[in-house]
Image (cartoon, helix red, strand yellow):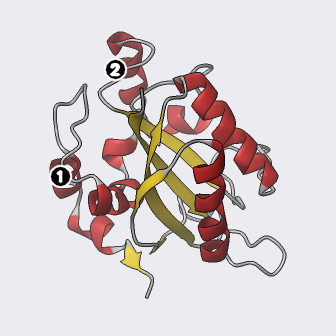
């Protein structure tokens, strides 16, 4: 049975002469062919590089995909798409040609609420140093990131975080105004 899967898309490095927004358009087609039909896509946004100083500004978006894939297989396919678009995992939070993050699948919590809570509590320094060795859903930091929530609010404002119990709109409103204001739609 198909489930609603939420995916964050981002890029801040061109591929050849293709600018990041062109790359993201191409990626949406690839996602539709490999993961499942893209049922909604946000506008594209220019966002400050995260973390600051790690490269040029990003282009970010969010997509909703209908897929019957198991969570691990879905993530594996997203990683294969990243690799096909030149993604190299050499530096945590470094500049990249493509970043695809699986944000959530319906109300699924993986691997369990305790692990989810532990990753949500990590401080900024630990986040920079540690990477999960397994899929954690929902993405443990989506509630903290305007570059994720602002695009996600375009397509899934009512989706509720299954651990926090807050909607995308509520989580977005909880962010500092300066963070939300820095996420600028691309005309």
Q: Position of residue 153 (x, y in %)?
A: 27, 58
**Residue displayed at 57% across by 72% down:** 57
Q: Earlier in the sequence, mark 2 or mark 1?
A: 2
User: Which residue is nearer to you in this view: 130 or 17?
Assistant: 17
Secondary element under disc 1, as helix, strand or loop, is: helix
**Residue displayed at 79% across by 47% down:** 83
Tell whether 167 sits left or right of 66: left
Q: Which image quarter holds the N terminus?
A: top left
Tell whether 166 sits left or right of 133: left
For the image, the number of numbered tags is 2
**Residue displayed at 35% across by 23% down:** 108
User: Tag 1: Cα neighbours inside 10 Å, few (<14), some, or many (≥20)?
Assistant: few
User: Tag 2: Cα neighbours inside 10 Å, few (<14), some, or many (≥20)?
Assistant: few
Whether residue 138 is visible = yes
Quadrant in the picture for residue 111: top left
Furthest toward the front, the residue is 1
Q: Position of residue 20 (x, y in %)?
A: 65, 72
Quadrant in the picture for residue 109: top left
Find the distance from the CA under tag 2 to the CA under tag 1.
19 Å
Q: Position of residue 170 (x, y in %)?
A: 15, 49
- Compared to residue 187, the image places residue 113 above or below, namely above
Q: Position of residue 137 (x, y in %)?
A: 42, 27
Q: Which residue is mark 1?
A: 174
Secondary element under disc 2, as helix, strand or loop, is: helix
Contact? badges 2 and 1 (CB < 8 Å): no
User: Which residue is nearer to you in this view: 172 or 187?
Assistant: 187
Furthest toward the bottom, the residue is 187
Tell whether 186 sits left or right of 69: left
Furthest toward the right, the residue is 16
Q: Which residue is mark 2?
A: 117
Q: Which image quarter holds the C terminus?
A: bottom left
Q: Which mark is residue 42?
A: none
């Amino acid at each position: 049975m198909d489930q609603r899967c939420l995916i964050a898309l981002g890029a801040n490095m061109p591929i050849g002469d293709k600018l990041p927004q062109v790359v993201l358009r191409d990626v949406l087609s690839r996602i539709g062919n490999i993961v499942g039909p893209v049922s909604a896509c946000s506008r594209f946004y220019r966002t400050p590089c995260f973390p600051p100083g790690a490269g040029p500004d990003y282009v970010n978006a969010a997509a909703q995909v209908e897929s019957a894939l198991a969570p691990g297989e879905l993530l594996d396919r997203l990683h294969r798409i990243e690799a096909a678009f030149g993604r190299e995992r050499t530096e945590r939070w470094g500049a990249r040609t493509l970043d695809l993050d699986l944000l959530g699948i319906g109300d699924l919590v993986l691997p369990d609420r305790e692990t989810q809570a532990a990753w949500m509590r990590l401080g900024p320094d630990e986040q920079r140093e540690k990477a999960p060795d397994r899929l954690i859903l929902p993405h443990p930091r989506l509630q903290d990131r305007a570059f994720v929530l602002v695009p996600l609010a375009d397509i899934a404002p009512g989706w509720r975080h299954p651990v926090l119990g807050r909607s995308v709109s509520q989580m977005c409103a909880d962010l500092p105004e300066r963070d939300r204001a820095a996420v600028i739609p691309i005309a």
